[in-house]
Amino acid sequence: MIAINRHILPNGLRIVHNEDRSTQMVAINVLYDVGSRDEDEERTGFAHLFEHLMFGGSANIPDYDTPVQESGGENNAWTTNDLTNYYITLPRQNIEVGFWLESDRMLGLAFSPESLEVQRQVVMEEFKQRDLNQPYGDSSHLTRSMAYKVHPYRWPTIGKELSHIANATLDDVKDFFYRFYAPNNAILAVAGNISFDEVINLAEKWFGPIPHRKVQKRNLPAEPHQTGIRRMDVTRDVPLDTLYMTFHTCDRLHSDYYATDMLSDLLANGRSSRLTQHLVKEHQVFSQIDAYITGSIDEGLLQICGKPLPGISLQEAEEWVWKELELLAHTTPDENELEKVKNRYEAEQTFKSVNFLNNAINMAYFELISRAEDMNDEISRYRSVSPEDIRNVAGKVFRKENCSILYYFARKEKD
């Protein structure tokens, strides 16, 4: 059980805290409630661009990384469709450096043409390497655009098109920052060897003067229910044909979420999972196959991705997968099979909970979607999933009219 303290500054900044005297370190995690779902469809990739721009110099601090390194700290950041997250870990005696650094870039960035150009090139190069030039790199663009027709999950975090970042102006960037990077649109989570009183004092000193900003209320279009199977074939210079099957699932706060997550684990998490046992080992249909959920705050996806063995067509491979999915949708899994998944999850979560940084990250995330204290209930919620829950959710999800199928063909060499 993680004990959580909370406070809200007058400017709207939410603070959550957990004290851990077993370490000499402290983690500061700043979560901004902005992701790629908040972008204009003609200006995508901005949330990810800001993940980089936030390290390019702030209002009063031209270089972020040097003070971190000189203070014995580490930092990193990531962006998803739903949020942008930054963390810094420091020895407890140097923790004020972290409050100073994070508050200054919340106050404002340097916004220089030079910084924008440097980070633009970094992001564009990442787009090229990861999505344009890497085998199967465009699969996320393709599968998302098939599954979503109106919701902004239809493009990945990196952005819809390279040109959107290439054409971003300094005014575009400033507008995006002041619309979303605000104390009243952020959560400050602090965990480690630091008292709650010290956190409040430092937060009031460094974050308190930052002005409350007008943050536009999110009003995203709801994705209509899919009413028919969708298909797409592409041919690329890749090593092997690959099958992608994408299903709509519930949102993160839905009561079916935990069963949906366990459903993907039953299918393809570990050597004893169903798809690995039946379609890789026994019937030798695939060389490898995986299944996972996106875990999105809004209605998400469950995706199955597999590479058939030579001599197995993508159509045959798809038929084998449907047999497994229909079996799950019509029969309850064995209690022992489900218990393996529950045990694995509980072991992973218990191990993670002894780490102060993981606790800071989780506190911020759960405070965003509901309240930080809910992180303490996650294991019991997974434990409460029954075999009947798995069958019922499988029946809802694994319907052909709820599926988008991508045949990703490897280009054949000419004779």
Image (cartoon, grey):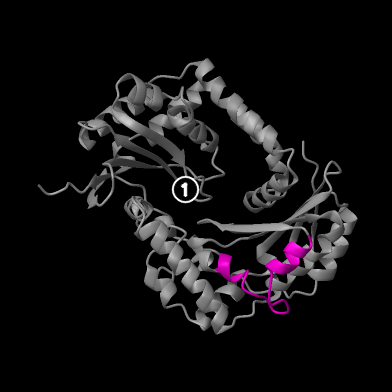
Which residue in the structure is indicated by mark 1? 299
Residue 114 in which image quadrant: bottom right
Q: Secondary structure at mark 1?
A: loop
Q: Return the residue nearer the eye: 388 or 22.
A: 22
Q: Is residue 12 visible?
A: no
**Residue 85 falls in image quadrant:** bottom right
Assess whether residue 160 is covered by the magenta stretch.
Answer: no
Question: What's the amino acid at mark 1?
Answer: Glu
Say which of 219 and 62 sits in front.
62
Locate residue 278: give its quadrant.
top left
Q: In the orientation shown, which residue stands out farthest toward the front? A: 415
Q: Residues within 10 Å of mark 1 (few under 14, many from 20)?
A: some
Residue 34 x %, y %: 57, 62
Measuring from the top left, give residue 246's x and y in whole percent: 36, 43
- Image point (87%, 57%), residue name: 93
Above or below, comparing residue 403 to residue 280 in the picture: below
Residue name at image x 49 percent, y 73 percent:
120
Residue 160 at x, y = what percent?
A: 39, 64
Q: Looking at the figure, which quarter contains the N terminus?
A: top right
Residue nearest the observer in this picture, 388 or 143: 143
Instruction: Based on the picture, tell me whether residue 53 belongs to the magenta stretch.
Output: yes
> Magenta segment range?
50-71
User: Does residue 240 appear anywhere in the picture?
Assistant: yes
Number of numbered tags placed on the structure image: 1
Compared across the picture, whether 194 is left or right of 229 comes to right
